[in-house]
Image (tube, rainbow, N blue to C red):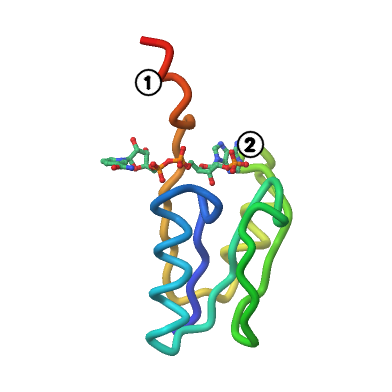
Amino acid sequence: MKLVIFGSTGSIGRQFVKQALEQGHSVTAFARNPAKLAIEHPNLNIVRGDVMDLSAVEKAVAGQDGVMCVLGAGNNKYLSQ
Ligand SMILES: NC(=O)c1ccc[n+]([C@@H]2O[C@H](COP(=O)([O-])OP(=O)(O)OC[C@H]3O[C@@H](n4cnc5c(N)ncnc54)[C@H](OP(=O)(O)O)[C@@H]3O)[C@@H](O)[C@H]2O)c1
């Protein structure tokens, strides 16, 4: 399947990307900072963007079979509480 993953650089998102690629899917990883993903694979397409940008999201989901959303606010907020 063709999958797009939002939150791909997060702790869960990276696992999604790895496991989807291992299972033979074609993955589009949507990321604000693609360098953070640190995964290379022939079936991995990385799209730089912010989910607050509607047109970037629309482009990323166009033609996909599945959309995974594992967005989060970051772990640091828990560390300060
Ligand atoms: N981790 C757990 O054990 C756990 C358990 C239960 C539920 N959850 C839920 O699962 C979700 C993901 O958790 P996580 O631990 O993987 O979170 P995380 O490590 O904080 O990752 C969050 C991801 O969302 C991305 N993101 C945030 N705002 C964005 C924006 N405006 N545009 C594009 N990307 C954006 C971050 O990108 P950047 O890298 O650019 O910041 C990062 O890739 C959260 O909703 C969390 O509450 C997590």
9 to the left or right of 32: left
Q: Give the x, y percent position of residue 28.
A: 59, 70
Q: Is mark 2 within 8 Å of ligand 1?
A: yes
Disc nearer the start of the sequence (1/2): 2
Image quadrant for the N terminus? bottom left
> Which residue has dot 1 on it?
78
Q: What residue do we see at 57% from left, 76% from top?
A: 63
Image quadrant for the C terminus? top left
> Which residue has dot 2 on it?
52
Q: Say which amino acid is labelled 2.
A: Met
Q: Looking at the image, which is closer to me, 62 or 52? A: 52
Q: Say which amino acid is labelled 1.
A: Tyr
27 to the left or right of 46: left
User: 15 above or below 33?
Assistant: below
Q: Residue furthest top?
A: 81
Neighbours of disc 2 within 10 Å: few (<14), some (14-19), many (20+): few
Q: What residue do we see at 72% from left, 56% from top?
A: 35
Q: Nearer the viewer, mark 1 or mark 2?
A: 1
Query: How far apart are labels 1 and 2 at the CA level?
Result: 23 Å
User: 69 above or below 46?
Assistant: above
Q: Please tell me in which quadrant of the rendered image residue 16 appears.
A: bottom left
